[in-house]
Image (spheres, coloured by chain):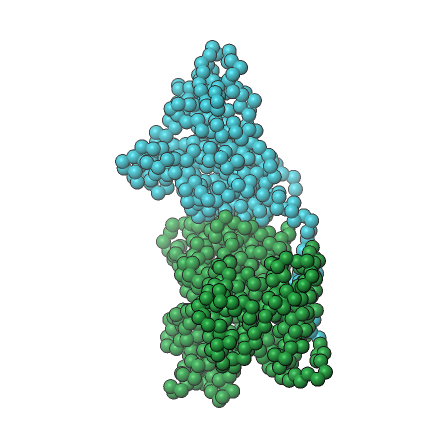
Chain colours: A green, B cyan
Amino acid sequence: MNKNKPGRNVSVSQLSSVTVRFAGDSGDGIQLVGSQFANATAIAGNDLSTLPDYPAEIRAPAGSLAGVSGFQISFGDDSVLTPGNKPNVLMVMNPAALAVNLKSLHKGGVIIANSDAFTPAGLEKAGYTSNPLDDGSLANYRVIGVPVNALTEGALEGSGLTQAQVLKCKNFYLLGMLYWMYGLGTEVTLAWINTKFKKAPELAAANGKVLMAGYDYAETTEIFDARFQLKKSPVAPGKYRNLTGNEAAAYALITAAKLLKKKLFYGSYPITPASEILQTLSKHRSKDVVVFQAEDEIAAICASIGGAFAGELAATGTSGPGLSLKSEALGLAVIAELPLVVVNVQRGGPSTGLPTKTEQSDLLQAVYGRHGECPLVVLAASSPADCFNTTLEAARIAVKYMTPVIVLSNSYLSNGSEPFRIPKLSELPKFQAGPLPAPADYKSFMRDPETLARPWTWPGLAGYEHRVGGLEKAEGTGAISYDPENHERMTALRADKVARVVGEIPPTVMNGPAEGDLLVVGWGSTYGAIATAVSAARKVGMNVSAVHIRHIFPMPPDLGPIMRRFRKVLVPEENSGQLRLLLRSAHMLEPLGLNKVQGQPLNSDEVLARIHEILRGN
Amino acid sequence: MERTKLTAKDFSSGLPVKWCPGCGDFAILNMLQKTMAGMGLPREKFAVISGIGCSSRFPYYVSTYGFHSIHGRALAVASGVKLSNPELSVWVITGDGDGLSIGGNHMLHAIRRNMGLKVVLFNNRIYALTKGQASPTTQPGTKTKTTPLGAIDYPFNPARFAVGLDCTFVARGLDTDIAGTSAILERAAKHNGTAFVEILQKCVPFSDKEFDPLKDPAGREDLLLRLQHGKPLIFGKEKNRGIVFRNFRPEIIEFRPGAAPAEVAVYDETSAEMAYLVSGFTQPDLPVPVGVFKETLKPSYEELYYDQVKVIGDTKEHELETLLAGPDAWEIK
């Protein structure tokens, strides 16, 4: 790969980690280029983390600020926990992409721009009165303008393709340049192109040619006076793939059903950003993976409740507005005591809010957002690959305790990706529902003394015919009961059953010393930002630790004692303080907050700044 | 194990039935228990699923698996049950409010998919469990607690609603017509796709005059048109009236009993067009049709689903590992 031309002096720097952002029109193939780059870095042995950032509009007018789509990737030789804060390299396809993204670029960072798009019309659409590539306004950055349109046309001269087809290849030109800059191999992308355009060999040839032309251009031209090389990241041996959070959740559901030796029944309705779970499972439909695209959110959860009643592992997926629609049916699943996994991929709310952006603002809805006293289990995933483990655990708890379990993911986790070590089935815990009594001893609401779960029986099993429903049941028999004291006992039993899930929670893992000045308590998608910030703070001598909780309801039993060993507690969240509210009411503590409600993930710089602020104030 | 033949009594849960005295639900319960006993399936192969309303208490009184779900959602729950286990005989018990108002969307889509469900919709033209509010089938001008000046909404005609959606089996019966309605339920039980059965009944406390003329032995045959496949559309106590279509418009003609002219339309339940015309008949201009409007055959949703995935076969454990690995996995040693 390092075939430097003789006589050319190129410096090769060793880096520990790099963050690159690609940006362009939503029709420019930005997500495609980003995910190819992610695969190439993964195969080169780097750890990585990615974050796509789409506009809500599928195709806003070309070149407009509203239509800018982005994809950010961090990769490096150490454990990469977040897609990075400010990018070091910004690759822009047009002036609008520059205008939207410049403020997040590191001072001194590199801008690679398609200079052919910086026409008077393009500049005007982005609100520029002069061309930033040559008016001196980017003096704090290294600007590399590349006439990508012209170079792509040159590379494909005589190809017989139309002008439109030729220009569609231009994203691969930039990708080729980046591959050279970071010493990455082009083989994977070339193979991908050949598969993708199997039916159109002329397009496969053209895209491949453009990729290599970009690679060679970067190697040959004088404007690239530096290239970077990353050391391989030390990761555990095994088989890996790059997985988004939504894919991870989908594969976890298939895996859970397999471990349980049942069908998976997944009823869902398309909603951003949860649709990829439905799509991924649809791809893997079989007689064991039953996927039902329902007519609405309510039908989706009700069909899944039907699937659970029929004795299969049932799940549904949605985002905030859909969770609201499902809340009545969640009450039914709670009172009927049926197992159900609900993956809620949070987005900016309320209402349609920021449908493509990320937030952590459904926590209270998940814990409390139902009528009546309606406790269920809530878990939160902390990284794209952790969506697999968390969803798998949700299925295990749902079946063991005969309860609905909500898994909180969010837009950031669902679209972001990271390397996922593929487990061998033998490594995963087998699990099953509790044992069934003999038909003569069976009562539909008898309970396991340890878990308080009722026995799971389903149509087709002779001798266990019973009726369930939304009406209150008599303790034990499951017959309809309006008895006041029975209702109070059943309310307490349902709460006690969910409370017993604390028995499933392992001791909380401390990141840092067990006592000190400040404990940062996080949940969900802020894991990477908090871990990175806390480790940076400790490096400069601050006495800071962190814990990250997966079990939101019930909470880890050791969390209270852990928090009390620190002088202060900080809870960073992408909401106005929802976990903080729960911690305050459960533990009579006054944690400090760091709250960001911008539809953008918290980044480690922000967490670090808040840590400095708190400890300086000591 | 050899099974003795089941009777209607075997399908009774033994719970005291708590409908109002005189309610037609009792008769429908008896007919349905008898129909189930006649199907030759063991009790555990049945699932009876309901929403909310007086009729939706039904599952508690049947000794099969039962699910009394939430308002309007019975069809959605039932779709999940049937798709999970297509071997089950899945019955949905609903009413005019539950099935056509709050649950209208699920009714629409279950029928569109031809989901293999037997839907029995009890139409008493009122919200009875909530004590007397207008429903989507309440007739214009009817005074109820929520329409003190008389209802102004245009009502649904449930059978025509189902015919309009090209439901593969549509029928209408009366709770008091044991022979006719039992025959309909038996046919519904055997139908492979969505079977939609509207049963006309009154609510003793809240709509006690509904359908009375249709049930009065003295005059009912002049008001009812009993549909029979392949038979002319003849009605009247004396069987002296018939329906002819002139330019697709129905007209009543009279003739000497036994001497119906050839122009009287012959009913064809395999014709969606005929079913659409006839299901629109209403009093006072035309007789009220009862019987099977339509039975056509097309694969049910669950048949299409499992046929489509048959080629894939079982997901064996080792195949699951392959599936998890996907096409782009890499190995780190």
Q: Is residue A140 visible?
A: yes
Q: Is residue A496 visible?
A: no
Q: Is B99 left or right of A341, judged from the image as shown?
A: left
Quadrant (top left, top right, bottom left, bottom right) of the C terminus of chain A:
bottom left
Q: Position of residue A244 (x, y in %)?
A: 57, 65
The residue lying at 53 percent from left, 43 percent from top is: B47
Q: Position of residue B77 (x, y in %)?
A: 50, 47
Q: Is A503 in front, or is B116?
A: B116
Q: Is B129 in front, or is A220?
A: A220
Image position of A167 with respect to A480: above or below: below
Q: Is A566 left or right of B183, judged from the image as shown?
A: left
The residue lying at 59 percent from left, 47 percent from top is: B85
Q: Position of residue A510 (x, y in %)?
A: 51, 79
Image position of A158 with respect to A603: above or below: above
The residue lying at 58 percent from left, 43 percent from top is: B301
How many numbered marks have been drawn onto this rendered protein structure? 0
The residue lying at 62 percent from left, 55 percent from top is: A283
